[in-house]
């Protein structure tokens, strides 16, 4: 559900194919799953493919230094939550204990010339910093080298992927902030998350969906393989998304949106005071307790009168839920859904809803969810979306759903990942990304 009431016409990013990884050969049943689902992975995986040296033909990337292959890259198919995540994260703590014991890593000053071939005195510190965390091959981290070469650029990209930042190889403020978090604090964040992971990774089952709120990411997981991964937009710091353990039971095509009372109070009333035509312009109708439509002029917008009515947005591309809503039982009244505000998926700071989870390329996730529901193949789903009619489909078999708060972990690929503590639940201080972006 969206906390933003204005709409955007920007189109969604293109879905990029995820190539088969060799690691899948060692996972039971993974080959079949990869063939069936990997082509549906979201655009973020293009960055992972580039970092791993794969282009669209499965050949080594032209701009990738072979020496960097000694550094392990993130794997798109490695799920955040699996039965092994807690144990692998405990091993990562030991690694970070060693980093801390060696003195951690240096602070990196701002870099003015972070481009291939450019020189800057701060790049020598950057090399040392990236080598200390395992992002740069030690052979490429010679003392005093102040050249921003392709080794350093790929190390920066790897660091950015591990921290959920745009992988552009540029040392912007958000990347610099993340680099300058002390090693001891990173180690402590891993320790805090181990207890969460031990609780979250029991009895997961063979097929489930995970929303990692700090990562603003959704994963569809089957037999311990992330067969789909989607960028998401989740709750604002002052309207946080809740932790949820539920089951997805239904998909709604072309849904109405009934505006929650909290959003009526916080958003609609102030908007109507400023723009009396706002509801009409945005296809939102008002109904009284007898389900009769009420004109906006009948309501006193300078009182609490409005909270006693029902506000319902008509279906369509303008709808705050977009064309698709994913339903699951929850006491919090939140959904997973499409959105007309697709430009937000391109941001590093994707905490912009009133608690719901907006999903990039949500139709691909729905195809996976309905793959075990007879009669609902891709063509039927496309037809339902294009019809413009409200269509509700119950899943033949409910799919377990977990909204979790994990800010540090190491998955089956052994690569340690961090996300900012956007809701300040770790007790280690404020969020670097939040400080930069807000």
Image (cartoon, rainbow, N blue to C red):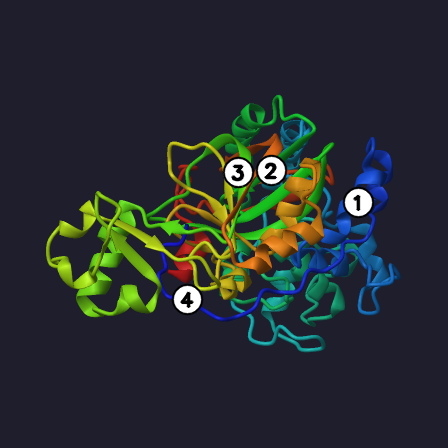
Q: Pick whichever of labels 3 and 1 is earlier in the sequence.
A: 1
How far apart are labels 3 and 1 at the CA level?
A: 28 Å
Res 36 label: 1
Can residue 371 be seen here? The reply is yes
CA–CA distance between discs 4 and 2? 28 Å
Residue found 71% across the figure and 35% down from its top: 222
Element under disc 4: loop
Q: Quadrant of the C terminus?
A: bottom left
The answer to whether the residues at label 3 and label 1 have Cβ atoms under 8 Å apart is: no
Q: Are marks 3 and 4 in contact (CB under 8 Å)?
A: no
Q: Nearer the viewer, mark 4 or mark 2?
A: 4
Residue 9, percent from left and from top: 49, 71
Q: Position of residue 295 (x, y in %)?
A: 20, 61
Residue at label 3?
406
Whether label 2 touches label 1, CB < 8 Å = no
- Disc 4 and disc 1: Cα gap in Å? 35 Å
Label ID, residue 209: 2
Question: Looking at the image, which residue is at 47% across and 63% down?
Answer: 341
Mark 3 crowdedness (10 Å alpha carbons): few <14, some 14-19, many ≥20: many
Disc 3 versus disc 4: nearer the observer = 4
Is 424 on the left-hand or right-hand side of 288?
A: right
Element type where label 3 sits in the image: loop
Q: Secondary structure at mark 2?
A: strand
């Amino acid at each position: 559900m969206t906390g933003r009431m204005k709409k955007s016409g920007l189109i969604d990013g293109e879905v990029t194919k995820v190539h088969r990884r060799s690691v899948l050969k060692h996972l039971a049943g993974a080959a079949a799953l990869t063939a069936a689902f990997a082509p549906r992975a979201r655009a973020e995986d293009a960055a992972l493919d580039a970092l791993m040296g794969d282009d669209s033909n499965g050949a080594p990337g032209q701009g990738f230094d072979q020496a960097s292959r000694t550094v392990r890259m993130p794997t798109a198919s490695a799920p955040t939550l699996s039965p092994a995540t807690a144990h692998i994260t405990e091993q990562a703590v030991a690694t970070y204990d060693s980093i801390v014991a060696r003195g951690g890593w240096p602070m990196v000053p701002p870099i003015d010339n972070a481009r291939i071939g450019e020189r800057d005195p701060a790049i020598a510190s950057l090399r040392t910093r990236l080598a200390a965390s395992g992002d740069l091959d030690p052979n490429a981290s010679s003392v005093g080298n102040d050249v921003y070469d392709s080794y350093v650029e790929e190390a920066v990209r790897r660091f950015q992927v591990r921290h959920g930042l745009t992988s552009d190889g540029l040392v912007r403020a958000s990347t610099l902030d993340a680099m300058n978090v002390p090693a001891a604090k990173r180690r402590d964040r891993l320790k805090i998350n181990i207890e969460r992971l031990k609780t979250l990774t029991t009895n997961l089952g063979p097929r489930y969906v995970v929303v990692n709120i700090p990562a603003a990411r959704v994963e569809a997981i089957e037999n311990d393989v992330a067969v789909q991964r989607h960028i998401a937009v989740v709750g604002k710091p002052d309207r946080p998304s809740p932790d949820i353990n539920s089951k997805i039971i239904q998909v709604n095509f072309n849904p109405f949106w009934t505006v929650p009372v909290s959003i009526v109070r916080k958003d609609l009333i102030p908007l109507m005071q400023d723009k009396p035509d706002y509801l009409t312009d945005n296809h939102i109708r008002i109904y009284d307790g007898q389900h009769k439509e009420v004109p906006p002029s009948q309501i006193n917008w300078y009182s609490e009168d409005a909270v006693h009515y029902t506000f319902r947005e008509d279906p369509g591309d303008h709808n705050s839920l977009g064309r698709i809503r994913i339903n699951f039982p929850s006491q919090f009244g939140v959904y997973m859904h499409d959105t007309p505000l697709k430009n937000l998926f391109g941001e590093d700071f994707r905490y912009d809803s009133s608690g719901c989870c907006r999903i990039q390329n949500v139709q691909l996730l729905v195809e996976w969810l309905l793959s075990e529901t007879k009669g609902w193949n891709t063509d039927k789903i496309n037809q339902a979306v294009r019809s413009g009619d409200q269509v509700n489909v119950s899943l033949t078999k409910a799919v377990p759903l977990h909204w979790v708060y994990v800010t540090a972990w190491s998955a089956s690929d052994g690569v340690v990942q961090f996300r900012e503590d956007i809701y300040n639940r770790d007790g280690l201080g404020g969020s670097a990304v939040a400080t930069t972006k807000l």
